[in-house]
Image (spheres, rainbow, N blue to C red):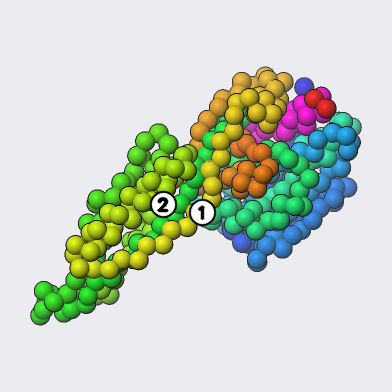
Amino acid sequence: MYTINQERLITTFMDLTRIPSPSWDEGEVINFIINRAKSLGLKYKKIPCRQSFNLLITLEGDKKIKPILFSAHTDTVTPCENVNPQRSKTKITADGNSILGSDDKAAIAMFLEGLNYIRENDIPHGDVEVLLSCAEEIGLKGIKLFDMSQIKSKHAFVFDCTGSVGKIILKAPYHLNMSLKVKGKAAHAGIEPEKGINAINILAEIITKIPSGRIDDETTVNVGMITGGRATNIVAEEASCELEIRSISNSKMKQYERTIKEIARTIARDNKGRITILSNLEYAGFSINESAYITKTVRKSLEAIGIKAEYHISGGGSDTNIFNKSGIKAVNLSCGMQNVHSTTEYIAIADLINGTRLMLAIVNTVYQNR
């Protein structure tokens, strides 16, 4: 089933990887995709999003069939200049000097080849929407700024998970960012240090006392950035840190937020310092049942191409979180990328092919269940 044009698929993927597309600077790769959409006679909307664009492509079909949405993102992490993909018989790799960009250009190549296949083989289908967001890698910025009312579909299949094709992410975490800023009192460190209140010392004590690392199988806490002080001869008047809490459970996330606030305020007060605490929900989590329509659709589609579904819980966020928060049921699916965000990144050619076949199988499963 679904004899994919392997050479065309690989060429598309490798061409995509050669185009630099750091967050907020995805214009060139977006224009590449638009040219392909035009060649297939597809409708598209290039939607301004700050200094970049989100791109919505539509393959119109039978209006009696449920419309479905496939989604990926156009940006990559850095270094993404001068990408030189290396092809062997079984995989495509980075050359060791940059990322490869399979996160998430593998998905884009799969979608373009899938749409091409549908056109060439007159595959019956309903409306197929493809949303490609910008600035995903820096906090899901593009999808957060996208007007979801432009989408007809009530179900979204996001191809943005690592691992061989077959993984279905049914749960992903709530993600809360916190900023702790301690204010002490400056003094000359060599002449009268006793007159100062060292904000760095206070912050250090806070960091050692708050929960950290993997808290349980649903929750993590991480202090990722620290700043403070002005010079070695000044008792540090200010110090701050940025941290995050992630949890599949919204209540646990809020519980650890309260715990961190209580610890930080107590330690600052006991050391005669002051503290300012800011919290911001980066994105909400989601949980999809194994018996849900969208899950069963993916499972049946994987079975149709001879792959067994694997259900997973993720510790990372994706555009999938935003779709679910917006009322569009969505799952995140693996699309073959391995060692992402590193110069050892690679993807198996078999996964490029299987990801394309999965897209086509989903279209067919939805059509068959009309």
Q: Where is residue 59 drawn, in percent x and y? A: 84, 43
Q: Where is residue 16 drawn, in percent x and y? A: 68, 49
Residue pictured at 65% horizontal, 66% vertical: 51
Q: In this view, does 58 lie above or below 230?
A: above
Residue type at mark 2 is Glu
Residue pictured at 69% horizontal, 50% vertical: 132
Q: How crowded is mark 1: few (under 14 residues within 10 Å), some or many (20 or more)?
A: some
The magenta stretch is 350-368
Q: Is the stretch drawn in magenta largely helix, strand or loop?
A: helix
Residue pictured at 61% horizontal, 61% vertical: 24
Q: On the image, numbered disc 1 is attached to which residue?
A: 282
How many numbered badges does the structure rendering display?
A: 2
Q: Where is residue 340 drawn, in percent x and y? A: 52, 43
Q: In which quarter of the image is the C terminus?
A: top right
- Magenta span contains residue 282: no
Q: Residue 244 carries which label?
A: 2
Q: How crowded is mark 2: few (under 14 residues within 10 Å), some or many (20 or more)?
A: many
Are the two marked residues, 2 and 1, in contact with CB atoms closer than 8 angstroms?
yes
Q: Is residue 268 above or below residue 327?
A: below
Tell me how far mark 2 sits from mark 1, CA to CA.
Answer: 9 Å
Residue type at mark 1 is Glu
Q: Disc 1 on helix, strand or loop?
A: strand
Q: Quadrant of the N terminus?
A: top right
- Which quarter of the picture shows residue 297? top right
- Magenta span contains residue 367: yes
- Which quarter of the picture shows residue 145? bottom right
Q: Nearer the viewer, residue 1 or 189?
A: 189
- Identify the mark nearer the N-term, 2 or 1: 2
